[in-house]
Image (cartoon, rainbow, N blue to C red):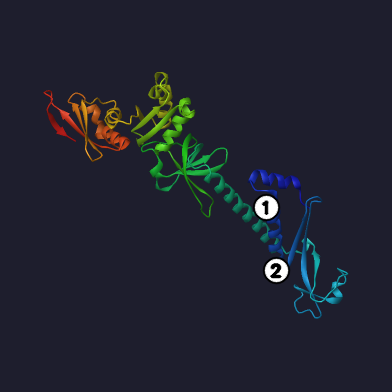
Amino acid sequence: MIDIDILRNIEEEEGVSKDYIMEVIQAALQAAYRKTFNGQNSVVKIDLSRGSVKIYAEKTIVEQVENSVLEISNEEAKKFTDNVEIGGTVLIEIPTNKLSSTGIRTARQVFQQKILEKKREVAFEEFSGLVGTVITGRVTRKKGKGEIGVSIEPHNIEGVIISEEAIPGEQLRKDRLVKALIKEVKSSVKGPQIILSRACPEFLEKLVNMEVPEVQQGIVEVKAIVREPGLRAKMAVATKNLRVDPVGACIGTKGVRINAVSRELNRERIDVIRYNTNPVVYIENALSPGKVERVEIIPKTKEANVYVSSKNYPSTLGGGGINVKLASNLTGYRIHLIELSEEGDANEQK
């Protein structure tokens, strides 16, 4: 007998359809029959209205039986059907208690394996459609090569933050809730391999989208983002609404919005700058909080000479040159930072 409620529970808990479960039951019983009788001639019939499962041996009617598993004599066939014809077939019910213990074990293994394979297939399809979205998960363990396992809620499936997608120096302790972006989903024999990222620019953009209503609504557009994960990031924003300050909208009152994003990124510093189609203005903005004297675009190249006073040179350069590096990546221009002496002469070029 089939318990319909059990089928429903499997359907809900394992995420596989009732129709597929019935297909699996048929395959499992056919495997049990093959193991017991060494034959391929089984037919499984399921009647959901009665909750019954019956297994039959399909035998060919012959004049002289040479293989009792596959064949049945003319006289013997008359016990099971009135339509007896040489070369025809007859179905003979096989009580399930006639299946061997090894056959039953085989059926159980086939059922479990096929359900597991379907679960993995369903999970792969589901998460493949979620690439580029942010999930919340609980840190489960540290794996080899600096990888971190994350149980994705509420799916109860594990994703992994590989070392290249982790924020350098960030300590993610077990059971901590973290957000991450689903960057890639790979198929494997163990199920979908879900690659999570906390280091990519897209993750920062998604966090901003979650914190800033004007970005969600399309009033403010994020034009570009560059990051040195865990250290500093720059984000260029723009708007067509003249009554909205795109930078202020992203920063929020007293920095509440951008600080919320920064906390999620292990206190990464985020510079929000105003995008401009004029490369001179855009480069000036990108070098914020540094202050520049003037910008010279080098003709026919994606390069620019940027002149800075001695007083403003350190802040414009940034520690280890990070401010210039990020500004170059953001604008697409290779920036040559030139320090001016107090007299206004160019002393040094970086």
Please name the residue that numbered disc 2 is placed on: 40
Residue drawn at x 81%, y 66% as measured from the top left? 92
In the rendered view, would you say 228 is above or below 274?
below
Q: Position of residue 118 (x, y in %)?
A: 61, 52
Q: Nearer the viewer, residue 108 or 50?
A: 50
Question: What amino acid type should be assigned to the residue bearing mark 1?
Answer: Tyr
Question: What amino acid type should be assigned to the residue bearing mark 2?
Answer: Gln
In the rendered view, would you say 185 is above or below 296?
below
> Mark 1 or mark 2, which has the lower sequence index?
1
In the rendered view, would you say 285 is above or below 110?
above
Q: Which mark is residue 20?
A: 1
Q: Nearer the viewer, residue 310 or 145?
A: 310
Q: Position of residue 266 (x, y in %)?
A: 39, 32
Q: Is residue 23 visible?
A: yes
- Asked if residue 305 lies left or right of residue 127, the reply is left
Residue drawn at x 17%, y 29% as measured from the top left? 339
- Tell me, yes or no, whether the two marked residues, 1 and 2, touch with CB atoms within 8 Å: no
Q: Position of residue 144 (x, y in %)?
A: 42, 48
- Asked if residue 349 lies left or right of residue 241, the reply is left
Toward which corner of the image does residue 58 lie, by quadrant? bottom right
